[in-house]
Amino acid sequence: MRIDKSVFVVTGASSGIGLATAKALAARGGKVALVARSGDVLDRLAAELPDSVAIVADMTDFGSVRAAVARTLDHYGRIDGLVNNAGRSYAAAVADIEPEAFEEIFRLNVLGPIVAMQAVIPAMRAQGGGAIVNVNSGTAFMTIPGYSVYSASKRALLGFSLTARMELEKDGIVVGEVYPFVTATNFGRNRMGKPGAGPTGNYAEGDTPEFVAGLIVQAIEEGAAQVFANDRIRALAGA
Ligand SMILES: NC(=O)c1ccc[n+]([C@@H]2O[C@H](COP(=O)([O-])OP(=O)(O)OC[C@H]3O[C@@H](n4cnc5c(N)ncnc54)[C@H](OP(=O)(O)O)[C@@H]3O)[C@@H](O)[C@H]2O)c1
């Protein structure tokens, strides 16, 4: 899909991969609805990116997700692309998983993206097509002690994304996924759960968020089902 003059919703646009993606889309002439909880950060970004709009929403609150999409439609009159990027991890051994934390992670990483897809699909159908990119994770293909909730949430997202891709093909809506590896963002700092319970990774030495944003741009432009940050993830995926 062509990015120039198209309207995108980017969730998690206040930091890391979402922030870099919003900038990359705007640099290619895209108009971006910037969605996250940190309104002050979004307002500053909206002032920087032409034709963008800041929309505060909590992706774990489904009414808030639907309202964010409705505001985007009110503002631009159309939606061409959705980047479901907002997400967090949670570190806990299976023996210690707190059901409330599990629920929050699955609402944010799985159900929120599904509700966002459901909210944009009618507009995309009416327009004759669109692009949806769900930001997954290489950990969807890994078994890591202390990280089962996060990797299971991304495995679930993988299943819904591939199914939605098949279901929506007839409507001209292309669903794809991007699989980052360790990326230098606030992701490690924002991890829920006990410090030391999950894997240790030096995020500062990871890929740049701009690199991952480039993969998201590629997924939108090429309509690929899955775009991987490196060959290791591609091999783990069996792709
Ligand atoms: N960094 C990595 O190593 C890595 C690797 C693989 C996959 N990923 C995936 O990449 C995606 C982006 O993560 P990142 O690395 O850019 O992390 P990040 O820097 O922590 O950014 C996360 C974004 O999600 C937003 N967010 C968190 N909870 C939210 C909520 N309840 N409602 C709305 N927005 C919420 C945050 O904004 P607010 O706090 O302002 O709401 C922020 O903009 C995630 O899906 C993550 O799973 C990251």
Image: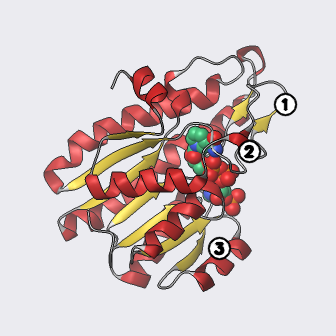
Tell me the element at label 3.
Answer: helix
Crowd around label 2: few <14 · some 14–19 · many ≥20 (10 Å): few
Look at the numbered disc 2 and give the secondary structure of its residue: helix
Q: Nearer the viewer, residue 218 or 149?
A: 218
Asked if residue 212 shows in the view, the reply is yes
Question: Which residue is the site of mark 2?
Answer: 204
Question: What is the three-letter code of the residue carrying label 2?
Answer: Ala
Give the class, few, some or many, for how many residues have Cα within 10 Å of label 1's Cα (few <14, many ≥20). Answer: few
Image quadrant in which the C terminus is located: top left
Q: Is mark 2 within 8 Å of ligand 1?
A: no
Residue named by callout 1: 194
Q: Secondary structure at mark 1?
A: loop
Q: Where the N terminus falls, by quadrant?
A: bottom left
The quarter of the picture where residue 116 lies is bottom left
In the image, residue 222 above or below residue 38 = above
- Does mark 3 have its CB less than 8 Å from ligand 1? yes
Label 3: how many Cα within 10 Å (few below 14, some 14–19, many 20+) = many
Whole-number angstrom distance, CA of label 2 to CA of label 3: 23 Å
Whether tag 2 and tag 3 are in contact, CB under 8 A, the answer is no
Q: Residue furthest right?
A: 195
Would residue 90 be found to the left or right of residue 221 on screen?
Answer: right
What residue appears at the point 51 percent right and 62 percent down from the top-left corner?
21
Q: Which is more toward the observer, 127 or 143?
A: 143
Q: In the figure, is residue 23 to the left or right of 194?
A: left
Q: Mark 1 CB in 8 Å range of ligand 1?
A: no
Q: Pointer 1 and pointer 2: residues touching (CB < 8 Å)?
A: no
Q: Position of residue 162 (x, y in %)?
A: 32, 36
- Residue under pointer 3: 42
Q: Position of residue 136 (x, y in %)?
A: 49, 40
Q: In x, y percent, where is residue 199?
A: 73, 25
In depth, the one of 236 and 31 nearer the eye is: 236
